[in-house]
Amino acid sequence: MSAMDRRYDLWALALIGSLLLFRVIIVLISPAGLHGDEAQYWAWAQDPAFGYYSKPPLIAWIIWTTTALFGDAEWAVRIASPFLHTITAALTYLTAARLYGSKTGFFATALFILMPGVALSATLISTDAALLVFVALFIHAWVRLRGGAGWGLALILGAAFGFGMLTKYAMIYVVPAFVLALILDRATRQSLFGLKGLFAAAVGSLILLPNLLWNARHEFATLVHTSDNANLSEGVQLNPGELVEFLGGQLGVFGPLTFILLLIAFWATRKSRQDFDIWLALLALTPLLIICFQALISRANANWAVAAYASAPILLAAWAVRSEKALRWVKIGLVINAVLCIVPGVVMSSSHWVDQLGFANSVKRQRGWPETADAIRAQYALGDYDAVAVDNRLMFYDLLYYGLPDTAPLYMWRFEPRLNSHAEMTNALPQDDRSVLIVSYYADYAPYFAQDFDTLTPLSEIDIALGGGKIRRLYTYAASGYRGPVFRD
């Protein structure tokens, strides 16, 4: 190893380590409460299982581990996230350096660890942080196996796929590029088209099997939910605005300049003579193109293509390092991304700065939940109620995390007979004559409640100040004689 290679090793280590320290501090001091999705994952962690309605189980297992060690504070729920992204950054360096050298490894690592999407994700707990670890590990094991590695790397390849699927079914996006490589790439075919490949497939299948069995016992709830996200029940309609919004979201995920450079790198790959460039491009393009199509015919969230960004930083760095001009543009993009990583992180660490700089709208769903639970307790104490029922999944889990069930049984009212959340699967409001305080997230749901209950009386609204001029307004009703959900017109 040359002196320059050692220098890039040290720079990568310093960058990864310093950002890990910065992000851990942000998690520890953040005033933000749990978002409803985070609270949902925490609730799942109270009952470890092999599956849940909307996601496979690994996120709950991770939170179970951190909260068992550190307690149930918000920071303890989230603390794994910056470490997971650090692991992905390290794997990015190892893979890129093995393929293209230490210089490419450093820039690939910088492109990943300074992604604005990673900066945001590192302050929350989500399935994306863990998914990226396993996609990056899968790619690294694949590269090593192409270079002649033994059975241990085949075990890692299979385990990475299996645990990735236990994190998020988006792990499946690695399959098209990998299968094509088994057919068209001699090095991949020689290393894995045989007993070693079968062994890797068996390992991945065994790891995934308990989740598949859980789904079979629960009417394939997670698989049905995943397909429901396509939102095609009302037919296919072209929505170019959704596509534009999704692509615009990628500027925020990967970086405003670096995403544009990535598109150029994709185009340049068609002429590349580096044999792994095409597989990196396909690994990134598969989720991006699939979710672009999804956005065009229905809708898509910006993070649905996150699996692309385990390989995209390596591809972009490899392309840029071959040209001083391209590398200069990447450096400019990295400076922009660094600002987008550090400044919002510092701002979000202070409620005062958030309000003063006009970011209150960005964090309103993470604020005011202890006060909301207290206000509902006060309303509950004014009547002779047997339970509280809510009509919003995220509100249900935030109220659960912030202790409302210590005062009153908490249930989920169902909008329709079919299940739409894990809360409906496990905590659906029973059909009986009990007196219920309904707390509604929506202003216009009274007609639906009237269809489902024998009696319904509107009560006062609950307003919770969230800072920065934002208010959470909830609508309350006294009800009894719940008959169950009906099919709505």
Image (cartoon, rainbow, N blue to C red):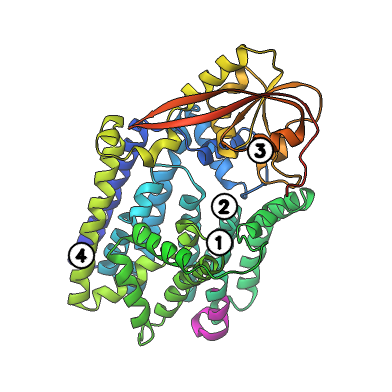
Residue plotted at (65% across, 74% down): 195
Residue occupied by mark 2: 167
From the viewer's perspective, is 345 left or right of 66?
left
**In this image, 216 relative to 146: left or right?**
right
Residue situated in front as seen by the camera: 229 or 486: 486
- Of the two numbered discs 3 and 4 on the same chain, state the one appearing first in sequence: 4
**Callout 1 touching callout 2 (CB < 8 Å):** yes
Q: Which residue is under mark 4?
A: 331
| Residue tagged 1 | 171
Q: Which residues are magenta?
A: 178-188
* Amino acid on which the number 3 mark rests in the picture: Ala
- Helix, strand or loop at label 3? It is helix
Q: Residues within 10 Å of mark 3 (few under 14, many from 20)?
A: many
- Of labels 4 and 1, earlier in sequence is 1
Give the distance between the C-alpha atoms of the residues marked 3 and 1, in whole angstroms: 25 Å
Q: Residue 423's x, y, as percent?
A: 66, 38
- Circle 4 packing at 10 Å, graded few (<14), some (14-19), many (20+), is some
Q: Quadrant of the N terminus?
A: bottom left
Q: How far apart are the two marked residues, 4 and 2, measured between alpha carbons?
A: 33 Å
- Residue 434: x and y in percent read 77, 21
